[in-house]
Image: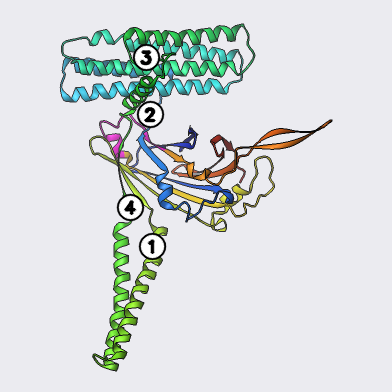
């Protein structure tokens, strides 16, 4: 089953993360993701103002391994725990510092950071879903305890690596990871405290929990300062170095997950063959006219000359008409782009195909038309008059057997596709985000502020080996950017 996560990445960009598991016991696993974005006609988004090239220029795809799932409480428990695997890899490298052990040591470092970050985030997300009660507070308490144990277990390895066989550069990688997980922990603790402050009533239990959270966060900041790490916020500076450091550490820790991609146009060979046929057909027509006119009017005559000119004109038009027709047929058979996925060793793990088009509403699948007509609170049909529709389809093909055999991929259960789409071009024709409204009072009227927003409705059809699933999202935005993203239930 495909797992999706949608969120606002920045003011004008939304991010859709899709996780595609590689099924066990099969050679390949295939997924299809078909999406349709319904855009208000007033925004003037169409084939002319926003062609296919503009769409792909505003779309960014990041392909990486799916981060392994591990409960936060299991980060330090058992022989197969992330910390134990890291310890084993580090000790093997210190005993036998060859190239192979060095690669495994670095990969384990980065993977530990990624697994820890996901585990902590998943635990926090679960706690947030619980209503503000003692149960929620106990869960947050458990997160603090388990996070502290994980950090202590990781830092207990540092003194053991101060050995002559490990070079300073490789030892510093351990410290870089330490700096990253400390920074990540502090940030998540502060966001956790921020969440608790705005939910539920303030009581003794909540006050005590908040004090523990903020104390933990302050301790992490003091720890980084004591270690001489760069990633420490300075309240009296612009923190330029801090933000740059965060970006660098995040890329460093996540680099073990990201895969190499090589993108090319799909169906290039078929396209060239069909275009050659179109050219050949037009040439046959022109040559036939030339032979006929020559036999009828003879050489070096004015009628023969006129026939040759007309046949050349017709040949050129026939060639272009055939090219346009064949291009349309090719779009139905092939995708726009094909992306080959490989790991760091050049090992092929699969490919992704993607294409974009502007379909008509009445040509959409029936279930998509039904889903679009449904409003959020009622079952009354809504007719999307004059809406422009962007169709984006994607086919994901994973070589499951190869992925599980690969030495560097055996820790991962699948591939994650992170899509970021920038909507800046959609704001060009939007009205001002605020409007003055008249409100009647006992003495007359006064002005109140009204917020002008636009709704972009996104419908997605996921097709996997286990079945088909539909999702609907509403992207609410104005000229200043994305306001929020609503997840809407679909009744089909």
Residue where numbered disc 4 is placed: 265
Residue 22 visible in the current orientation: no
Residue 385 drawn above or below residue 62: below
Q: Nearer the viewer, residue 21 or 185?
A: 185
Near-viewer residue (283 or 151): 283
Q: Position of residue 330 (x, y in %)?
A: 38, 60
Dot 4 or dot 2, earlier in sequence: 2
Tell which circle, 4 or 1, labels the residue nearer the N-terminal end: 4
Q: Position of residue 192 (x, y in %)?
A: 51, 17
Look at the image and give the residue range highlighted in magenta: 401-418
Identify the mark nearer the N-term, 2 or 3: 2
Q: Which residue is mark 1?
A: 327
Element at badge 1? helix
Give me the disc on residue 177.
none
Between the residue at mark 1 and the residue at mark 2, the CA separation in whole angstroms equals: 40 Å
- The answer to whether residue 63 is visible is yes
Label 3 and label 4: CA atoms lie apart by 46 Å
């Amino acid at each position: 089953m495909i797992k999706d996560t949608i969120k606002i990445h920045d003011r004008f960009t939304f991010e859709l993360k899709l996780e595609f598991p590689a099924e066990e016991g099969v050679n390949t696993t295939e997924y299809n993701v078909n999406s349709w974005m319904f855009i208000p006609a007033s925004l003037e988004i169409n084939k002319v103002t926003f062609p296919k090239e503009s769409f792909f220029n505003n779309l960014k795809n990041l392909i990486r391994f799916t981060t392994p799932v591990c409960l936060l409480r299991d980060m330090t428990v058992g022989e197969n725990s992330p910390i134990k695997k890291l310890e084993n890899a580090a000790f093997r490298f210190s005993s036998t510092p060859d190239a192979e052990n060095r690669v495994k040591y670095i990969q384990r470092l980065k993977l530990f950071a990624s697994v820890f970050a996901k585990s902590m985030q998943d635990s926090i997300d679960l706690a947030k879903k619980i209503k503000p009660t003692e149960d929620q507070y106990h869960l947050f308490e458990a997160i603090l305890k388990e996070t502290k144990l994980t950090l202590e277990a990781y830092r207990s390895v540092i003194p053991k690596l101060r050995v002559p066989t490990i070079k300073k550069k490789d030892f510093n990688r351990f410290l870089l990871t330490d700096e990253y997980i400390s920074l990540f922990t502090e940030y998540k603790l502060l966001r956790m405290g921020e969440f608790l402050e705005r939910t539920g009533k303030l009581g003794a239990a909540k006050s005590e929990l908040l004090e523990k959270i903020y104390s933990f966060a302050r301790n992490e900041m003091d720890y980084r300062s004591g270690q001489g790490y760069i990633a420490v916020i300075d309240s009296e500076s612009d923190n330029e170095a801090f933000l740059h450091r965060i970006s660098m550490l995040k890329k460093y820790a996540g680099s073990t997950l990201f895969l190499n991609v090589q993108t090319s146009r799909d169906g290039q060979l078929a396209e060239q063959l069909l275009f050659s046929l179109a050219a050949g057909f037009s040439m046959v027509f022109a040559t036939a006219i030339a032979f006929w006119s020559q036999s009828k009017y003879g050489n070096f005559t004015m009628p023969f000359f006129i026939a040759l000119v007309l046949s050349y004109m017709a040949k050129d038009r026939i060639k272009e008409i055939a090219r346009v027709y064949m291009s349309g047929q090719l779009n139905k058979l092939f995708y726009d782009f094909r992306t080959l996925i490989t790991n760091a060793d050049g090992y092929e793990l699969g490919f992704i195909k993607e294409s974009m088009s502007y379909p008509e509403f009445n040509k959409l699948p029936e279930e998509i038309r039904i889903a679009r007509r449904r409003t959020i609170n009622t079952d009354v049909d809504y007719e999307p008059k004059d809406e422009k529709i962007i169709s984006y389809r994607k086919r994901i093909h994973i070589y499951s057997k190869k992925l599980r055999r690969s030495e560097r991929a055996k820790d991962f259960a699948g591939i994650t596709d992170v899509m970021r789409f920038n909507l800046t071009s959609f704001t060009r024709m939007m009205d001002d985000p605020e409007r003055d409204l008249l409100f009647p009072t006992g003495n007359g009227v006064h002005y109140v502020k009204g917020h002008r927003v636009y709704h972009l409705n996104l419908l997605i059809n996921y097709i996997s080996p286990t079945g088909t699933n539909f999702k609907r999202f509403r992207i609410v935005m104005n000229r200043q950017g994305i306001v929020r993203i609503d997840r809407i239930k679909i009744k089909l």
